[in-house]
Image: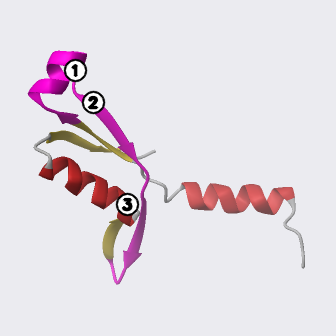
Amino acid sequence: MATLSLRDFHGAARYALRHYVPFSYYARSPEIMAKEGIARPCVCSAFVIAVDSRWFLVTAGHVLDDIEAERRSGLELVRFRLWDG
């Protein structure tokens, strides 16, 4: 098995990181606001891909499950942001 040179590894990492787009949002409820004074920040990892000129933001299934569970529990999710570098 061939090993990847450090130069090739850095090149591959730079390529992959060009597509890495984390996103964030805040989860808030009266209880969180009373206890912490601010909404709870949440940061998730994602990446972008293009298929037939259509762009998609892709994240792990557990991230979507967590977001849905927060919504079902009554949390208000606000201020979604993409962190594009």
In the image, is 83 to the left or to the right of 4?
A: left
Nearest to the eye among marks 1 and 3: give it. 3
C-beta proximity under 8 Å, tags 2 and 1? yes
In three-dimensional space, the C-alpha distance between marks 2 and 1, rounded to whole angstroms, equals 6 Å
Mark 3, residue position: 62
Expressed as whole percent of the image width and height from the top left, the position of residue 30 reads 9, 26
Residue 37 inside the magenta-drawn segment = yes
Q: CA distance from mark 1 to mark 3?
A: 25 Å
Mark found first going from the N terminus, 1 or 3: 1
Decide if residue 6 is on the left or right side of residue 44: right
| Mark number displayed over residue 40 | 2
> Judging from the image, what secondary structure is the residue with disc 3 in?
helix
The answer to whether residue 19 of the structure is visible from this angle is yes
Reply above or below: 83 against 30.
Answer: below
**Circle 2: residue type:** Arg
The answer to which of 63 and 35 lies nearer the viewer is: 35
- The answer to whether the residues at label 3 and label 2 have Cβ atoms under 8 Å apart is no
Image location (x, y in percent) of residue 49: 42, 70
Neighbor class of circle 1 (other Cα within 10 Å; few <14, some 14-19, many 20+) is: some
Instruction: Say if 21 sits above or below 52 in the image.
Output: above
Label 3: few (<14), some (14–19) or many (≥20) C-alpha neighbours in 10 Å: few
Q: Earlier in the sequence, mark 3 or mark 2?
A: 2
Q: What type is the residue that disc 3 sits on?
A: His
Query: Which is nearer the eye, 81 or 70?
Result: 70
Q: In the image, residue 2 lies at what x, y percent?
A: 90, 76
Question: What residue is pinned by disc 1?
Answer: 38
| Model colouring | secondary structure
Q: Residue at x 61, y 61 (%)?
A: 15
Which contiguous range is marked in magenta?
A: 27-53
Residue drawn at the location 25% of the way across and 52% of the way down = 67
Nearest the viewer among 57 and 66 is 66
